[in-house]
Amino acid sequence: MSVIESEEHKALREAVASFAKNHPSTPAPDSRRFWQEAAKLGYIGVNLPEAYGGGGGGITELCLVLEEMGAAGNPLLMMIVSPAICGTVISRFGTEAQKREWLPALADGSRLMAFGITEPDAGSNSHRITTTARRDPDTGDWLLTGRKVFVSGVDIADATLIVGRTEDARTGSLKPCLFIVPRDTPGFGRRMIDMELNAAEKQFELVLDDVRLPADALVGGGPSHAFGSGGEDAGLLQLFAGLNPERIMTAAFAIGMGRFALSRAVEYARERTVWKAPIGAHQAIAHPLAQAHIELELARLMMQKAAYLYDAGDDVGAGEAANMAKYAAAEACVKAVDQAVHTLGGNGLTREFGLARLITAARVSRIAPVSREMILNYVSHQTLGLPKSY
Ligand SMILES: Cc1cc2nc3c(=O)[nH]c(=O)nc-3n(C[C@H](O)[C@H](O)[C@H](O)COP(=O)(O)OP(=O)(O)OC[C@H]3O[C@@H](n4cnc5c(N)ncnc54)[C@H](O)[C@@H]3O)c2cc1C
């Protein structure tokens, strides 16, 4: 891995930046169009295999795309979910039929897939999820029952990848199984959550009430694959294959947003003059902006390391780096946004300058997909070998 970006990656970065700049905002109806245009240019499916219509790249390229979109003020949250989690899980573990059905459509932007793991009574503790799959002995169908919360984009996604567990795995360690649930399947109810977020992508509470799914809705195929001898942990591997890209992409989302806020603040600080020199000449304004820049750059280095390890097939090494990158990027983003708003004085809180809304948006990356505290727990236990309190 080189810490200096290749010419190819620089060119991709520039192309995405200029594309995203020409789409100044993405309110609900326009975000789908923006998505499809980005997909046509190969940006959305850049990480998916070429054999299935993707770009044949990795998470390295996908996170670069998302970061540049965010830096232009135009992040596409569903990139974290559709190509990064769902696309990766299906390409690595899906059956041939699932790959053919989903990957070309996820890559060309014609279909989207959401991802649901969080539950009201489990939250950060995903070992506690209770969404349960049982088999109808007569038909071989799966019947899925449970609740999910905060799932993004279920309304615009053609299907949601739902993390459940089988009936006999309800107790003990998590033995997940992943199901592709089409949006309009009977028994699959959704209610939009009234979030204090100004974004095109909405969050939903889901109720799965005996949702009947064909046997082939299970990612990777039949139960022998997921739970039989030898394949016992297939579901867990599938889940982790998706969670590392999710963390790396959330880092990209946060770094992009932080860069966007910082660039707005710097532009303002260069011009705004209320004494003799522009406010950016005061170190009380300049230094926190310089710090924000340094911290975003550092977070990006860790993100690139995590993406590199992931793309090289080192899932374990990528796990630690992805957690650290997500942590560093979220903290850098929250700080950059806070300082940007402050730099603009009263204008920082106007709609016109568009920074105040980022105060809430920046917090998302500190909470989701895994909170700051759970990453600190991970590093305390896994990296430092400290004992657990829970
Ligand atoms: C905008 C948005 C989009 C989202 N999109 C999706 C999605 O598409 N799909 C999906 O499945 N989920 C999604 N989520 C859910 C997200 O992943 C969860 O909110 C997150 O995992 C935290 O879970 P929780 O909200 O239940 O918090 P809780 O688990 O209740 O945690 C609350 C607080 O307690 C702290 N805490 C909990 N346990 C510990 C501990 N052991 N030690 C120290 N502190 C602890 C946490 O750090 C946090 O600060 C989204 C959330 C948001 C806000």
Image (cartoon, rainbow, N blue to C red):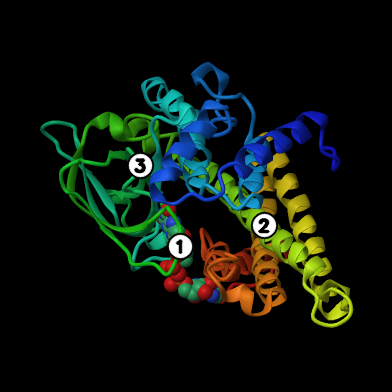
First reached walking from the N terminus: tag 3 or tag 2: 3
Ligand 1 within 8 Å, label 2 CB: no
Q: Which mark is residue 119?
A: none
> Looking at the rendering, in which quadrant would you find the N terminus?
top right
Instruction: From the image, tell me which residue sits under label 2.
Output: 260
Q: Which mark is residue 157?
A: 3
Which kind of residue does numbered mark 2 sit on?
A: Phe
Distance from label 3 to label 2 (Cα)?
27 Å
In terms of depth relative to the viewer, which is nearer, 114 or 174? 114
Which kind of residue does numbered mark 3 sit on?
A: Ala
Circle 1 sits in a helix, a strand or a loop, which is it? loop
Where is residue 220, by image quadrant? Answer: top left
* Image coordinates for residue 75, horizontal then vertical, percent: 56, 49
First reached walking from the N terminus: tag 1 or tag 3: 3
Distance from label 1 to label 2 (Cα)?
16 Å
Residue 390, visible in the rendered structure = no
Neighbours of disc 3 within 10 Å: few (<14), some (14-19), many (20+): some
